Amino acid sequence: MSENETKESLNFIEQMIEDDLKSGKNSFVQTRFPPEPNGYLHIGHAKSLVLNFGLAEKYNGKCNLRFDDTNPEKESEEYVNAIKEDIKWLGYEWNEEARFTSNYFETLYGYAVKLIKKGKAYVDDQSAEEISAGKTNPTIPGIPSPYRERSIEENLDLFERMKNGEFDEGTSVLRVKIDMDSPNMHMRDPIIYRIKKAHHHNTGDTWSIYPNYDFAHGQSDSIEEVTYSLCTLEFRDHKALYDWFIRELEIFPSEQTEFARLNPSYTLVSKRKLLQLVENNHVTGWDDPRMPTISGYRRRGYTPDSIKNFVHKVGIARRDGITDIALLEYSIREDLNKKANRVFGVQDPLKVVITNWPEGKTEMMQAVNNPGDETAGTREIPLTREIYIEQSDFLENPPSPKKWYRLGPDREVRLKYGYIIKCTGYTKDETGNITELQCEYDPETRSGQDTSGKKVKGTLGWVSAEHAVSAEIRMYDRLFLTENMTAIDDEFTNHLNPGSLTVIPNALLEPSLKSAKPGDQFQFERQGYFIVDKDSTDDHLVFNRTVTLRDNWAKKK
Ligand code: ATP
Ligand code: MG
């Protein structure tokens, strides 16, 4: 490998930062994560978090957490707290206290007054429809508002009265005077303040006017001296406006750089639509394990590392695209493969009676907790005369032993960590279902002490009937059936996967799981990774399936 190849390659933002630090354009890295507290964080936000907090960590800088709370009707304290919890869970620490755009309302108001005094802003009494019509479209010049040439004194007076609550909602707005002929529609005298007599989660009833997102966002970055203001591509055309504000207001020159949104396949990343799923009970809440929210993934059993590794694998691009969700599933398998202990669990139990095993005898078998991690140690599991195996591990008329390694009449398999057993008979009920197998074990074949010289290809998981712990298992699958959820044009709920949740009310698990606590994670051998859900009680264990062992969707495509 050449020297260049061994060096970690930089993404375009890191390259820009390194260039700026070298040239002296910037002397420090200050970023921020600016969520609007109108919903829970989703997997798309994880990309922005990893980017903003990651850059601050890498370049010895700081990352602020700023709640962009300019939209009082949709925002709440619940969301503020949930967002903080998710960021901490991912392992990030924001600089000082969390900030709120609403803490800058006074400063922003002052900025607006400054623009009025410079003759660069005016109160417009047109209706929303008239303002919109006046902007026309990018190919023809706009129609200036009849209020555009109001005097500075009149504008100052009207704006103050707007602030004092003297006018009704919708009667007037404050617009900046830029260029009604600009090909960039954001420069055609955008609105920067509206009258809204709404209660705000942070400022209460202090304000009757609220700044628009575009007036608040860039200026808040300046107030916080953010050197790298990173946002998603849809704000590209807003940059000219932010730069205009900075020039006219003569404030700290935060500079915006855009990157591509993360859009995983079979996934929705829009808080507005996720809220609809919650409100219309398509899911049980923001943290339903099927939700693509950070809290949903947490409850589902995804780890912070799996989410961060996923984002790193996706990388930072300048063009939008769809990311294969299988990459996230791969990341959690990779992480849990290292961290999760293996256990036996039977989802669809079939009783097996070992007929030559003495009644009442219990023999303890030694099982390896994690074959990839010696330090994880071993545990003992009881083997008894009656056990359960998976229904799907027995076939009455199996194909040749070369194609079917599991049980069938007269076939032999090894009970993992136990003995080799041979199926000598089976019982059916009147509808033809197999209800019991009779088997014989070979006492010479105890795992680790096998003196028989026998070789069998199949190894089965099992649990002792007498000792098994019963549990509810919630088998989760992808929430949507459509690969590209950004391209649909019908109602998005038409694309929900009706099979996204299957409940197994009575799975049987090995007795070591009796003491499992919410948040504990395991690999059920041959089945997948599972986490104990918070719905568990002392006598009712609930597990969520985090992910299957293999990608079952790969072949469906
Ligand atoms: P949504 O459409 O889900 O409401 P948003 O962009 O309005 O998303 P914000 O709360 O404003 O949500 O987002 C906070 C930060 O996260 C912003 O900087 C935004 O650009 C970024 N972000 C949001 N969604 C994504 C995504 N899918 N990929 C990358 N970054 C995202
Ligand atoms: Mg937003």
Image (tube, grey):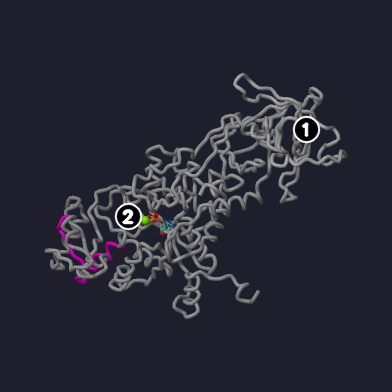
Quarter of the N terminus within the rendering: bottom right
Where does residue 377 sit, x and y in percent of width and height?
A: 75, 46
In magenta, the rendered stretch is: 107-127
In the image, 397 versus 215, the foreground residue is 397
Mark 1 secondary-structure assignment: strand
Amino acid, disc 1: Ile
Where does residue 456 sit, x and y in percent of width and height?
A: 78, 40
User: Tag 1: Cα neighbours inside 10 Å, few (<14), some, or many (≥20)?
Assistant: many
Mark 2 secondary-structure assignment: loop
Residue located beneath label 2 in the image = 70
Identify the mark nearer the N-term, 2 or 1: 2
Q: Determine the quadrant in which ligand 1 lies.
A: bottom left
Q: CA distance from mark 2 to mark 1?
A: 69 Å
Amino acid, disc 2: Thr
> How many numbered marks appear?
2
Residue at x 81%, y 39% (from the top left corner): 447
Image depth: mark 2 or mark 1 in front: 1
| Label 2 within 8 A of ligand 2 by Cβ | no
Whether residue 330 sits left or right of residue 176 in the image: it is right
Where does residue 409 sit, x and y in percent of width and height?
A: 73, 30
- Whether residue 123 appears in magenta in the rendering, the answer is yes
